[in-house]
Amino acid sequence: MLHALRDRLTADESAHLAAQLPLLIRGVYYDGRRPSIVPVKADREEFLHRVCGELAFDLQESEEDLVKKVLQALRKHIAAGEWEDVKSTMPKDLTSILP
C-alpha cells in the first residue's frame, strides 16, 4: 500500500508525506524507491491491483476495503494540510478511497 501511494505521488509530494511518517514506517515507505519513475500514473483499478498484487497473504475482504483501512490508519499520522495535498494530486477516481 505504501509503495503504491508513494509511486503515485510526485517526488516532492512523496518526500513531504514521508517526513510525517513514524520512523519505522518511513523506512518501509522508502524501501525500493526509484524517484526517476514517479509519478506512476494509475487509475483506481490499477492502484488497487498493484496493492493487492504485492500482498503476501490472501484477502479476507475486498481490495478497496483493505486500502481504505490502511489509509485510515496512515491518515492519523499526517497533518490535515499535507493529507489534502496528497489527495489533490490523486485522480478523481482514487480520491473517493482516501479518508
Image (cartoon, grey):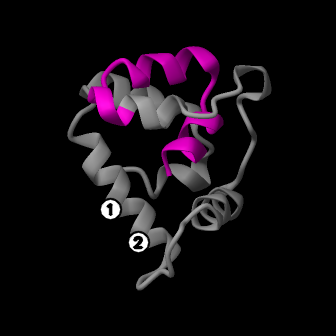
Q: Amino acid at mark 2?
A: Asp
> Which residue shows up at 41% across the image and 24% down it?
18
Residue 50 within the segment the image draws in magenta: no
- Which residue is most to the left? 76
Asked which secondary structure carries label 2, the reply is helix
Q: Position of residue 98 (x, y in %)?
A: 41, 50
Instruction: Give the residue number, with chain letter if any, for mark 1.
Output: 69
Residue 21 visible? The answer is no
Q: Is residue 32 left or right of residue 71?
A: right
> Which residue shows up at 41% across the image and 68% down it?
66
**From mark 1 to mark 2, how far is it between C-alphas?**
6 Å
Q: Amino acid at mark 1?
A: Lys
Q: Are marks 1 and 2 in contact (CB under 8 Å)?
A: yes
**Relative to 8, is 35 above or below?**
above
**Relative to 78, is 76 above or below?**
below
Asked which secondary structure carries label 1, the reply is helix
> Which residue shows up at 60% across the image and 63% down it?
48
Q: Is residue 37 left or right of residue 20?
A: right
Instruction: Give the residue number, with chain letter if any, for mark 2.
Output: 65
Residue 75 visible? The answer is yes
By secondary structure, the bulk of the magenta-drawn segment is best described as: helix
Magenta segment, which residues?
1-25
